[in-house]
Amino acid sequence: MTALPAQPVVYEVNTRVWLGEIARRTGRPTGLGDVPKDCWDEITPSGVDAVWLMGVWERSPQGRAIALDDSELRGAFHAALPDAADDDIAGSPYCIRRYEVDAALGGAAGLVAARTELDRRGVGLLLDYVPNHVAPDSPWVGEYPEYFVRGDAEDLQRDPAGFLDTGRAVLARGRDPFFPPWPDVVQLNAFAPQLRRATAHLLGHIGRFCDGLRCDMAMLLMNDVFARTWGERVGPAPAADFWPDVISEVRTEHPRLIFAAEAYWDLEWALQQQGFDFCYDKRLYDRLLHESPEAVRGHLRAEEDYQRKLVRFLENHDEPRAAQTLEPAKERAAATLIATLPGATLWHEGQFTGRRVHLPVFLDRRPDEPADVSLRAFHERLLAGVHASGMRTGRWQLLDCEGWSDNDTGRDLVASCWTGPAGRFLTVVNLSAHPAQARVRLPWTELLGPATWELRDVLGSQRYERRGAELLESGLYVDLPPWGSHVLSVMSGSPPVS
């Protein structure tokens, strides 16, 4: 088992798409046990701590049939892949029949081989878990109806889209409280003690094959959310919440297994308290894309210990491609900010090369798109530079940027620093389309005095010299172009010449 750092850098891979492209490149069928070493190297550039192999579990034939018959989904498939054929539609990786590695991907032996290759590189492995629902042809549906939210014949007649007659029981279809039921899944009952025990047992089994679990829509299983969604149908909530019950039991067998929650609705803090190591930071994503630098800075004023347990990202398989939503310079600025913040960071395969097509997860083939070589070089330099610096092993804090009475462009800058055994590091990012100037107040009292300090570019070769007294008393003067950034190490230089 690879020990992940406290704030891991995670690289998400759409497993079926990736393996299909390798097979077309090599001219032979490719499972997880057949991947050439250079292909593993491509998805584990310097600075990546873990790979999330998204979609390895056995998908549902019934779920796939439902998708093939859905005209709206068909439209989305052809919008992303104009020549999509039925053979390209694998079904949803979140409509899971069984938690066994799909035979088409090489089965359990392929997954073991994949983990071995990653472990050789010092890289961990994350896998999916979907706690809210299973496919209608999951063995659980027939064998364990007590695991599910139940209905009756009247429910089925009144709401046929919301319920499923299995022949043995009427069960609710999966849903969240804000949308109609999903037609291809069946709703598990988070209040059922039998389900909680079965979930812990299953996760204990999965935990033998990976270093962490990404739990889909984790907030849906929280007692208060589940009660609001299902009401009297599931009865009173248990005294204990779902996740503390499950996670505590799994950790008796796998104490170092990482739990990461896909989380929304500002429930990140609550899920952290319930045992999750990390939760999606969707709020930061939205603010970076759609709100002001002041809103971003306000979000970053939260306590550092809370922020260390967030997952920062600019895209993933649920969100549009960053190259589609952000102009190139803004994407680089946002990526620099993300990479130098506390917390885990999530990067999506294809993000580094500027892919623009958001591929529905049902598809196992994507269109060819030209690679942006300079964008890939930027991202790899960013991840490698931040990793090599060791900055994220220290303590982080947000810094103030002070403007002048006739120049308030400093409000568009976000500045922060790291302080720790690896040294002192400063990041300043201009989150605007115009130049911005300010003085950045630094927290290091040891700067005071006549000595000269060297500010060295972590991602390049530039160096600057500044007097310590100026840095501490007046602040560091910065003048950044539109979407520009500094990532600097602050090192003691030589005394000034008198």
Image (spheres, rainbow, N blue to C red):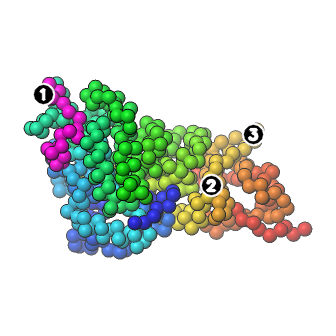
Residue 395 marker: 2
Q: 482 or 212, which lies in front?
A: 212
Q: Look at the image and tell me whether residue 280 can be seen.
A: no
- Name the residue rendered at 30%, 27% in the picture: 231
Secondary structure, mark 2, is strand
Whether the magenta-drawn stretch holds residue 134 is answered as no
The magenta region covers: 137-157
Q: In which image quadrant can residue 71 be found?
A: top left
State the residue position of label 3. 406
Q: CA distance from mark 1 to mark 2?
A: 58 Å
Residue type beneath disc 3? Asp
Label 3 environment density (alpha carbons within 10 Å; few <14, some 14–19, many ≥20): few
Q: 43 or 119, which lies in front?
A: 119
Q: Quadrant of the N terminus?
A: bottom left
Residue 153 marker: 1
Q: CA distance from mark 2 to mark 3?
A: 34 Å
